[in-house]
Image: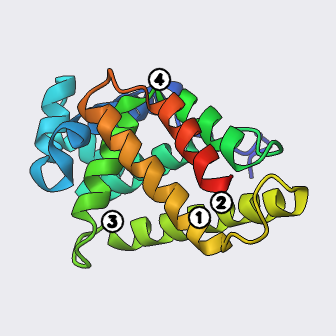
Amino acid sequence: MSTAEPRVRRGPYAKSRERRAEVLHAAIAVFGAKGYNGASMREVARELGMSLTAVTHHFGNKVGLLEAVLEETDRQGEDVDMSQGLVDWATNLAERNLARPELLRVLAIVAAEASSPEHPAHEWVVQRYDRIRALVMELVLEDQRAGRIAASHDPSYVVDSALALWDGLQLQWLIDPKVDMVSRLNFALKALVA
C-alpha cells in the first residue's frame, strides 16, 4: 500500500472556464442576432473559429447553450438596490441595461419565440415572468405602505402595467438607440404610480 497523498480532483482548468465564457458570449451575440430558432451551434463555433465538437463539449447541445445564455441574462442586475421603491429600482436597472444591449436583445427575441409552448425556453420565460412579477409586487406593496404609491391602486394592475412599460420601452430602445429609455421609463412609472 502506498503512503502517497491521495490525488485531489481539481476544478475546471482556468483555460476551460475562459473558453466556456467565450462560447457563452458568442452565443449571446448569435442568439441576439438570429434568435434561438434561427441560430445554430455551428454558427457559434464559427464565430469563435472553434470546432462544433469544442462548443458541444462545453454545453452539450443547443438547448444547454440556450439555458446558459438565459441564466447569464438573469444574473445581470441582481444587485440593484431595491430600498428606494419601484420607480428608482426600475430606473437604475434600466440605466444599467444600457451597457448590455446584447443580453436585452436575446431576452426580447427568445421571449417572443418562447410564447409558443413548444419552444425549449417556454417554461423558463414563464417562470422568469413569475419571478419578476413577484419581485415587482413586493416593491409595489412596500411603496403603498410607504405612501409612494396610492393605496387605491390595484397592485396587480400596477405590476402588469410596469412590466408592459418596461418591456415596450426596452424594445423601442433596441430598435432605435436614440430613444431615451431611462427617462421615458422614469416618467411613465411616476405617472403610473401617482
Which residue is denoted by mark 1 in the rendering? 159
For the residue labelled by badge 1, is the local secondary structure a helix, a strand or a loop? helix
For marks 3 and 2, the one nearer the N-term is 3
Say which amino acid is labelled 4.
Answer: Ala
Q: Residues within 10 Å of mark 2 (few under 14, many from 20)?
A: many
Q: From the viewer's perspective, is the residue at label 1 or at label 4 nearer?
A: 1
Which residue is denoted by mark 3 in the rendering? 121
Is residue 47 left or right of 167 when viewed as pictured?
A: left
Q: How many marks?
A: 4
Say which amino acid is labelled 2.
Answer: Val
For marks 2 and 1, the one nearer the N-term is 2
The picture places residue 118, in percent across and down from the top left corner, at 22, 77
Residue at x-position 74% and y-position 72%: 152
For marks 1 and 4, the one nearer the N-term is 4
For the residue labelled by badge 3, is the local secondary structure a helix, a strand or a loop? loop
Say which amino acid is labelled 3.
Answer: Ala
Residue nearer the viewer, 188 or 58: 188
Compute the Cα span from label 3 to label 1: 23 Å
Is residue 95 left or right of 24 when viewed as pictured?
A: right
